[in-house]
Image (cartoon, coloured by chain):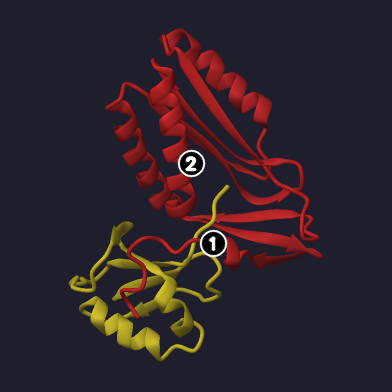
C-alpha cells in the first residue's frame, strides 16, 4: 500500500492523519512540513459534499507528483474522502515535506492547484439527501474533447 | 471486445463494443443520447493511461474510460 496517498470512506480523521505524518517524517530531517486541510463549507444550502474517485488514474497522477517532488528532495502526501462528507468536516489533506522552506511552499501551491484541475475526482453537493454534480465548479481535464 | 467505462457523473453502465480505434468509438457515442452531450468535455484514458489523440488503435480486451470535468477537495 502506498501510505503517502490514503483514501477514506466519509470524512477524514484529520488529527490522526496529520499526527501520523508528523510522527513518521519529523525524524527524516525535513526542515519544513506544510499541511493543507480542506474543510467543507456550509453554503448554498448544502448539507455536505460527496465524492467519486477513479483510483487507478489517481494513483498514477500521484506517483508522477511524487517523482517530481523527489527530484527536489521533497515528498508529497495526500488524503481524500470517498462518499459523503458533511459540512465543517474535512475531505482533503495535502502535505509537502522538504528540507527547505521555499521548496515546500512552492510545491504545496503547485500540488494543490494541479490536484484541482487534474485528479480524477468528481464532486457532488448533497441537497435534501440527493447528490447533485457540481458541474459549475468542475474543471475540464487538459486534452478533453477528442471524441467530439 | 473493448470495454467503455463512463466515470463520475455520466449516468451510464459500461459498454462492450467491437471496435478497432477511437474514431469508431466517437461515431458510436455521438449517436448515444446520454453520452453525446458529454463528449466535448470528457478526457479519455486507454487502459488507465490518459491520451490526447484519437489516433489510437484498440485491441481486444482494451478498456477506454471517459473522464468528465473534475473537482476534488
The letter of the red chain is: A
The label shown at residue A112 is 2
User: Where on the picture, by quarter, is residue A22?
Assistant: top right
Task: Classify B39 as above or below B48.
Answer: below
Identified at 56% across, 75% down, the residue is B11
Q: In this view, does A88 lie to the left or right of B16?
A: right
What residue is drawn where x is 66% and y is 55%? A50
Helix, strand or loop under label 1: loop
* Residue drawn at (48%, 64%) of the image: B69
Tag 2 subunit: A
Q: Mark 1 lies on which chain?
A: A
As drawn, the label of residue A138 is 1
In-front residue for pair A113/A95 = A113
Expressed as whole percent of the image width and height from the top left, the position of residue A131 reads: 69, 65
Point out the image quarter for the C terminus of chain A: bottom left
- Mark 2 in CB contact with mark 1 (< 8 angstroms): no
Task: Indicate the chain coloured yellow by its letter.
Answer: B
x and y, in percent, of residue A23 in the image: 55, 14
Q: Residue A120 versus residue B25: which sits nearer the camera?
A: A120
Can residue B65 be seen in the rendering of this structure? Answer: no
Quadrant including the N terminus of chain A: top left
Q: Position of residue A80 (x, y in %)?
A: 57, 42
Give left or right: position of B53 versus A99. left
Amino acid at each position: 500500500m502506498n501510505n503517502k496517498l490514503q483514501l477514506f470512506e466519509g470524512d477524514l480523521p484529520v488529527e490522526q492523519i496529520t499526527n501520523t505524518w508528523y510522527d513518521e517524517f519529523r525524524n527524516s530531517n525535513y526542515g519544513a512540513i506544510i499541511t493543507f486541510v480542506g474543510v467543507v463549507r456550509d453554503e448554498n444550502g448544502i448539507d455536505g459534499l460527496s465524492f467519486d474517485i477513479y483510483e487507478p488514474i489517481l494513483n498514477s497522477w500521484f506517483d508522477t507528483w511524487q517523482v517530481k517532488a523527489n527530484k527536489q528532495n521533497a515528498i508529497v502526501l495526500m488524503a481524500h474522502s470517498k462518499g459523503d462528507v458533511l459540512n465543517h468536516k474535512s475531505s482533503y489533506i495535502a502535505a509537502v515535506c522538504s528540507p527547505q522552506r521555499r521548496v515546500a511552499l512552492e510545491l504545496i501551491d503547485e500540488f494543490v492547484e494541479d490536484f484541482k484541475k487534474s485528479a480524477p475526482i468528481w464532486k457532488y453537493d448533497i441537497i435534501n439527501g440527493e447528490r447533485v454534480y457540481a458541474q459549475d465548479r468542475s474543471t475540464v481535464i487538459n486534452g478533453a474533447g477528442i471524441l467530439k | 471486445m473493448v470495454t467503455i467505462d463512463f466515470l463520475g457523473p455520466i449516468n451510464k453502465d459500461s459498454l462492450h463494443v467491437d471496435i478497432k480505434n477511437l474514431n469508431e468509438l466517437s461515431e458510436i457515442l455521438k449517436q448515444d443520447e446520454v453520452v453525446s452531450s458529454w463528449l466535448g468535455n470528457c478526457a479519455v484514458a486507454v487502459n488507465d493511461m490518459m491520451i490526447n489523440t484519437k489516433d489510437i488503435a484498440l485491441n481486444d480486451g482494451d478498456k477506454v474510460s471517459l473522464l468528465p470535468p473534475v473537482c476534488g477537495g
